[in-house]
Image: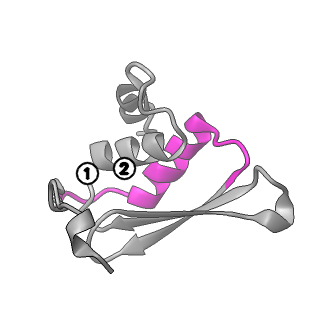
Amino acid sequence: MDEKRFEIVERQREFEARDERPFDRMRFAMRALDILRPRNLKVVLYERAHDFQVERGRDFGKGPDAEWALVGIPRHATREHIAWGLAQLVGAEDVPFVVDLLLRAEPS
């Protein structure tokens, strides 16, 4: 392979805010998904030890538009990070105030 054809413009950077305060992150994420209502997307949430991670793929057995997503939420994830990650997943990150809506909709 001719490596002169490629140039690294910027290496991958990772930043992750941490919130050590206890709250039910899975419940918060499920509530956010109830509000966001992803279409043709089956989302599975699971707890991770480290970084927030989203994997996504197509489910050709269910139709041409059917997709799946695995969302790994670490024990230290902030509400904002979860809300932003799920909004990005469903393509709503450009909707004004979507993260604010998700943060305020959390049941007490």
Front-most of 55 and 12? 12
Q: Amino acid at mark 2?
A: Ile
Mark 2 touches mark 1? (CB < 8 Å):
yes
Q: What kind of element bears circle 1?
A: loop
Q: State the residue lying farthest toward the top.
A: 96
In which quarter of the view is residue 67 placed?
A: bottom right
Q: Which of the image's four quarters has the N terminus?
A: bottom left
Residue at image position (45%, 23%) is 95
In which quarter of the view is residue 11 placed?
A: bottom left
Q: Which of the image's four quarters has the C terminus?
A: top left
Q: State the residue lying farthest toward the bottom.
A: 1
Front-most of 81 and 75? 81
Residue at image position (48%, 70%) is 46
Residue of label 2: 82
Q: Which residues are magenta?
A: 18-41
Mark seen at residue 45: none
Residue of label 1: 78
Left-right relation of 47 to 91: left
Q: Amino acid at mark 1?
A: Thr
Residue at image position (42%, 26%) is 94
Left-right relation of 84 to 8: right
Q: Position of residue 31 (x, y in %)?
A: 53, 44
